[in-house]
Structure formats: structure tokens, C-alpha cells
Image (tube, helix red, strand yellow):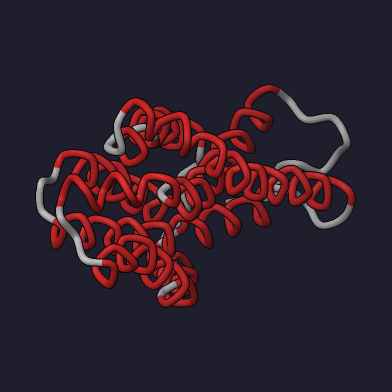
Amino acid sequence: MTTSATTDRWDARLWALLAVLCTVLFLDALDVSMVGVALPSIKDDLGLSTASLQWVVSGYVLGYGGLLLLGGRTADLLGRRQVLLVALTVFIFASLLGGLVNNGTLLIAARLIKGVSAAFTAPAALSILTTTFAEGPARNRALSIFTACGASGYSLGLVLSGFLTELGWRWTFLMPAPIAIVALVAAYRLIPRQPRP
């Protein structure tokens, strides 16, 4: 991928690409915090023990934090675009699985898979950003927007969790799926193909 943003003025396609990358990080951060308020409802509905309930949170964080370096390395070896698209697809299926299961073990597994997928989407998105925007003011501006979206995703997750839990705890797992689908389609169209390493 070439560095295409070399001036202070970005065209619509470049803004759209940045929006897709920001959405990916937003969803990753959102999922870290959004499940918190829903835990008591999950415990009552699925009959989970307190220890098992903790794994609903820890499974995602473990998969995300534990494989983040591997995700970055995989993006370098296999291609940033391909890794982002595949991992985002896994993220969508794990979101749907988490919202539809009736078994605590499957819910924890879905959260772990979702965390693993986020460990691949986040570094791939960051790498695409840094190779698209030229070093200097353009890249600094893009990185500022990117990190702000991650922080807002975490904060908004805390707020949305309460609202969605009122509708039903499953919505805290299902809600990211349609957003991720839109991001996947946009990423497929907007991210240039990268020559194989």
C-alpha cells in the first residue's frame, strides 16, 4: 500500500477509509466495556457461577491482549488488508454467536473468539493507517482521530451497556454485528489490495 495522504487536504475516499479504520478500533474498545452492566442478567438467565461469569469479561480481554503482538506480525506476513477482512468476519460471527447461545461455556468461547479476532483487527487497522498517511502532520492527525475513536468506544460501551441490558442482555452482544458488517463491506471496497510480501 502506498502512502497516499501527503497533504493537509484529504479527499472523500481517504476520509471514508479513515472512518472504517476508526470504526474497527471503536468496536474493539466498545466490546471491552459493554458487557459489564449485563453480567447480573447473564448470570440469572444462564445460571452461571461467579467464577464463570468473570470469564465472560476475561475471555475477551485474554484473547485480545494475549494475541495482539501475533496479530500485528500476522498482518505483516499475510497482508494487512486480508488479515483485517478475515478477522472482522470472525468478529461478526462471534458477536452473533454470543447473542444467540443458551449455554455459559459457549458464551465464554464466543467472547474468547471475539477477543482473538480483535487482536488481529486492531494492529492491522493501525498498520493500514500508518502506511496510508504520510509521516508528519497528516499521520499525526489521523492517529489522533483513530485513538480518540478507541477511547470513545470504551466510554460509550459503559453507557450503552445499561440501555441495551434494559432491552435484554443479548443485545450487548448482537449490537456490534451490523456495524461490523457495514465496516467489513466498506473495508473491502476502500482498502487497496496490498502486494504479497
Residue 186 picture quarter: top left
In depth, the one of 88 and 49 nearer the eye is 49
Residue 14 picture quarter: top right
* Residue depicted at 31% across the width and 38% down the height: 169
Q: Is residue 154 left or right of residue 68?
A: right
Residue 32 percent coordinates (x, y): 48, 55
Residue 143 percent coordinates (x, y): 74, 51
* Residue depicted at 78% across the width and 48% down the height: 144
Residue 54 percent coordinates (x, y): 34, 67
* Residue depicted at 53% across the width and 42% down the height: 157
In depth, the one of 21 and 92 nearer the eye is 92
Quadrant containing the C terminus is bottom left
In depth, the one of 23 and 48 nearer the eye is 48
In depth, the one of 86 and 109 nearer the eye is 109
Given the current orientation, which residue lies at the most extreme top position?
12
Q: Is residue 178 left or right of residue 132?
A: left
Residue 60 percent coordinates (x, y): 37, 62
* Residue depicted at 29% across the width and 63% down the height: 53
